[in-house]
Image: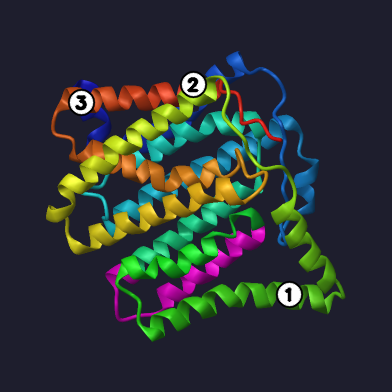
Amino acid sequence: MVFDRFLKSKKLYMLFLLPFLALAIAAIGFYWQPVRPHLSLNEGVIYADFLRNLSAEHSRYTGLGITLAIAYFMFYVNARYKFLPQISTLPATIYILLTTGLVLYQGFSYIQIATLLVAFAFAGLQEAINDIKSNSSIYSFGFLTALAILVYPKSVLLFPWAICVLMFSGRSTLKDISAILLGLITPVFLTCFYYFWTDNLQECIQRFQNSLLAGEFLTHPEGASVIFYGLLILLLLVSLYGIIVFYPISVVNQRRGILSLLSMLCFCSLSFLVIPDIYPDMLYMLFMPLTYIYSQQLINQRIGLLGDIFLFLLFLTGIVFCNANFFTVY
């Protein structure tokens, strides 16, 4: 129960401990997985040449740095828009716990930049939920979402998600839909114009297609990854039950925020079925709504012992992931 109260505390000391937590998990990962990372630079339409030349160590350091940035911003989003019942460092802590093992396995990946952009976009969505008089936040939400897709084309299902999520946000008027469509189109137009201006428009289209369609589809999990996904699904089912129980007493903005996270979780999960060669990259993005949902359950949990069990299973999930075998392909 002490462990439960420690992490659920409203004090912000965990923000200073996050880098040390990441290093501790990294140390465990290096002990179990001392091999070089499986570098996976699935470049999209927007890319940086210098990232191709990163060494294995620098790739890991870069990946850990971006992961920490995502975690800190996740804390900021909840602290700013309060769609969880209290200000808490739990989302950032759980995100670090679940993703550090993945960074060790593959180092830096463009999906991390895309995930950071989606975190910024989600902040714009929460701003739109809280301020129904302005459409600038909806435009920003669409713009950043499209930018994330251009950086990592395999996240293309974010496009229909960005439109569908407006139904859960209370912003579904014709003016709102026009704002998000304009936001989604703008970065695509600017990118295509740049390629056209440099006489490489065909390359733009080809790069997007190659990045989206390259690779094999997933089959079934093997080894420790079966335990990993079993634990994730078990904790998700417990969290969904908690959301249903506390849903009637939540304020409207909190309900809309959680529903937008659930819809994002559904579209990210669907990506594993319809997009080839997306595993394990997409886990960076999948874990973002998942950690908020887990945090919601932990904050609402009033029985300290159950909270400790939930946290223990989360830590076990993170440790198992450091040694998990990844999906095989056909």
Q: Is residue 137 magenta?
A: yes
Q: Position of residue 218 (x, y in %)?
A: 63, 39
Is residue 152 visible in this depiction of the protein? no
Q: Residues within 10 Å of mark 1 (few under 14, many from 20)?
A: some
Residue visible at 63% across and 45% down in the picture:
278
Q: Position of residue 99 (x, y in %)?
A: 51, 35
Q: Residues within 10 Å of mark 3 (few under 14, many from 20)?
A: some
Q: Amino acid at mark 1?
A: Cys
For residue 290, above or below residue 229: below
Cα–Cα gap, marks 3 and 2: 21 Å
**SS type, badge 1:** helix
**SS type, badge 3:** helix
Question: Which tag, 3 or 2, sits closer to the chain's start?
Answer: 3
Question: Which tag, 1 or 3, sits closer to the chain's start?
Answer: 1
Residue visible at 22% across and 35% down in the picture:
9
- Quadrant in the picture for the N terminus: top left
Residue labelled with disc 2: 320
Q: Position of residue 67 (x, y in %)?
A: 53, 41
Q: Is residue 170 shown left or right of residue 196?
A: left
Total numbered badges shown on the rendered structure: 3
For residue 11, above or below residue 116: above
Q: Which residues are magenta?
A: 128-152
Cα–Cα gap, marks 1 and 3: 52 Å
Residue labelled with disc 3: 306
Q: Is residue 36 shown left or right of residue 311?
A: right
Q: Amino acid at mark 2?
A: Val
Give the residue furthest to the top: 31
Residue labelled with disc 1: 192
Q: Amino acid at mark 3?
A: Leu
* Labels 1 and 3 touching (C-beta < 8 A): no
**SS type, badge 2:** helix
Question: Which tag, 2 or 1, sits closer to the chain's start?
Answer: 1
